[in-house]
Image: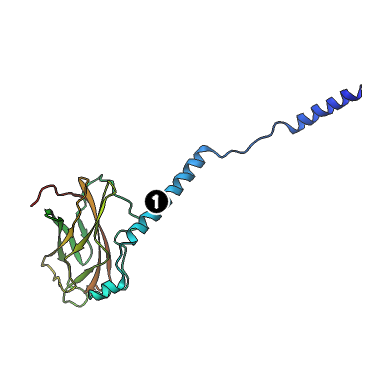
Amino acid sequence: MTLLETMHMDQNETEKKSGPEKSFRLPKSFIVLGGGSILVMAAGVVYTIFFYLSLPNHHDLDSAGQAIRHVPLPVPPTSFFPSGKGPAVDSFGSKDFDLHIGGVSRTPDGFDVSMVFTAKTDGADGDGLSLAVAGTPRWVDSRRNSGKGAASLSTATLFKKGLPGSFTVHFSRMPTAPVFDLYLGLVGTRGIKGDRFLIHFKNISTPRTRS
């Protein structure tokens, strides 16, 4: 056997032992799920910051006589943009009061949402309930439009058990979708002092005619 033949045999043996090199590849499903998770997390962060920026500062609240030290977000950070699907949710209940939307009417400069408040108890001191608006009332529709509002609720308004009261939330901008979601933050100032309520009404019909 010649030297050339011996070298050729050694080369063949080396190739058989080493074999073809294998490359490591991530499964496509892993890449898709990982990318989707990152997008969802990023959307949640942007959504939370977007609504957090609308919070009033404590000086504004103090000047209005509300003296609230802990203001809840006007929109829960776990709630994403509404889809417009599903039944309407126009009422909210707690152990101390019920709140529901009495009507939605168009005005020359926007629209009003009439809120009906019914106290179930007279509160811890027995003299009735009073609440303040915490944060900025806001509507959001399924087309990603939103609008800020102002409520006529005052801390001087006292709600007594069994006697319905009302207040209005006014918005200067109209939703463009047929329905919208309404977010309202309330905090107790008397009777249920310090109790905070994050209220989310869903799929409320957008007013189309002026009343």
Mark yes or no: residue 177 visible. Answer: yes
Q: Amino acid at mark 1?
A: Ala
Residue appearing at x 29%, y 67% in the figure: 56
Q: Closest to the observer: 70 or 211?
A: 211
Mark yes or no: residue 201 visible. Answer: no
Q: Closest to the observer: 97 or 178?
A: 178
Q: Where is mark 1, residue-wise? A: 43
Q: Furthest-left residue in view?
A: 211
Residue 128 found in image quarter: bottom left
Q: Is residue 54 left or right of residue 45?
A: left
Q: Is residue 5 left or right of residue 199?
A: right
Residue 96 found in image quarter: bottom left
**Residue 6 coordinates in the image, percent (x, y):** 88, 25
Q: Furthest-top residue in view?
A: 1
Task: Decide: is 104 above or below 54.
Answer: above
Q: Quadrant of the N terminus?
A: top right
Secondary structure state at the residue bearing disc 1: helix
Task: Decide: is 36 above or below 166.
Answer: above
Q: Is residue 53 left or right of residue 5?
A: left
**Residue 111 coordinates in the image, percent (x, y):** 15, 55
Residue appearing at x 31%, y 50% in the figure: 81
Q: Closest to the observer: 160 or 2?
A: 2
